[in-house]
Image: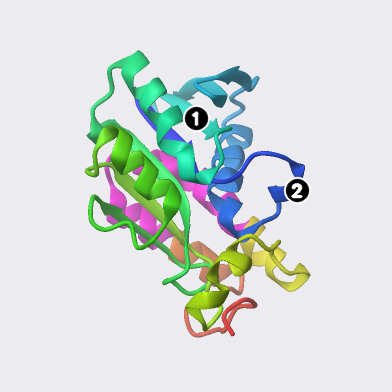
């Protein structure tokens, strides 16, 4: 079994925040693959289903970002999952808007959700990093990620989440570079190209 955890903060007031793009992506995966219903489990909400012949648990922690690791640890312990079976989907201010990069382990770059997961289960899990742009001043960072995406940003946000959901089987099959490349090409095909400054990148 794989555990896909979307990082974000619970509640309607945070639903559109840049910090919640991990939630949005995992919700899009559930919709695309008709996995339902979400139920209260593991200090959050979770749903279980099959994608690409693999059993997958989708989890949205209800613990707030800086305690995400508590929910992840509870789910991982319940299913006896190793770190190689855990994938965290999260916002990344060091990447331009709309860009996606994958990595396993490494630093947490000041991301409280990743730091919490590493504290609870270890560091060597997979991360799918969604670029949301940088406010230009690190002192503005907290306010920036806790703001909703601007109206002009929603087209690329929604396109990205849908494209991730469409191609997630590649991720499950361990074809990380193909997954990343497919997302890049599909975003470009929709007009969100590599050379284009997307809203949110100023």
- Image quarter (top left, top right, bottom left or bottom right) of the C terminus: bottom right
Q: Which of marks 2 and 1 is in front?
A: 2
Name the magenta segment's main secondary structure: helix
Rendered location of residue 67, percent (x, y):
47, 38
The reply to whether residue 49 is visible in this rendering is yes
In the foreground, 4 or 155: 4
Local packing at callout 2 (Cα closer than 10 Å; few below 14, some 14-19, many 20+) is few
- Image quarter (top left, top right, bottom left or bottom right) of the N terminus: top left
Above or below for 72 versus 183: above
Mark 2 = which residue? 13
Query: Magenta span covers which residues?
Result: 159-182
Rendered location of residue 3, percent (x, y):
39, 30
Snapshot quadrant of residue 47: top right
Q: Residue at x 63, y 60 (%)?
A: 146
Magenta-span inclusion, residue 173: yes
Q: Distance between the residues labelled 2 and 1?
A: 22 Å
Rendered location of residue 20, percent (x, y):
59, 51
Local packing at callout 1 (Cα closer than 10 Å; few below 14, some 14-19, many 20+) is many
Q: Which residue is drawn at 58% across and 32% down?
A: 62
* Residues at circles 2 and 1 in contact by the CB criterion of under 8 Å: no
Q: Which residue lies furthest to the front in this view?
A: 139
Magenta-span inclusion, residue 54: no
Mark 1 = which residue? 58
Snapshot quadrant of residue 56: top left
Q: Which residue is drawn at 77% across and 68% down?
A: 151
Secondary structure beneath label 1: strand
């Amino acid at each position: 079994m794989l555990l896909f955890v979307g990082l974000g903060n619970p509640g309607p007031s945070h639903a559109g925040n840049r910090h919640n793009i991990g939630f949005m992506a995992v919700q899009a995966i559930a919709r695309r693959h008709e996995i339902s219903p979400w139920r209260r489990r593991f200090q959050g909400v979770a749903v279980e289903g099959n994608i690409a012949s693999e059993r997958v648990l989708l989890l949205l922690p209800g613990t707030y970002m800086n305690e995400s690791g508590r929910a992840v640890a509870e789910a991982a312990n319940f299913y006896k999952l190793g770190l190689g079976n855990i994938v965290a989907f999260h916002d990344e201010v060091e990447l331009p808007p709309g860009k996606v990069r994958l990595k396993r382990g490494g630093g947490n770059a000041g991301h409280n959700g990743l730091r919490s997961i590493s504290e609870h289960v270890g560091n060597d899990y997979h991360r799918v990093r969604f670029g949301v742009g940088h406010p230009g001043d690190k002192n503005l960072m907290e306010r920036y990620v806790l703001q909703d995406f601007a109206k002009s940003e929603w087209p690329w946000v929604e396109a990205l989440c849908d494209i991730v959901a469409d191609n997630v089987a590649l991720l499950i099959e361990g074809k990380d570079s193909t997954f990343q490349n497919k997302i890049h090409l599909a975003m470009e095909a929709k007009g969100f190209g590599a050379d284009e400054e997307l809203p949110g990148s100023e």
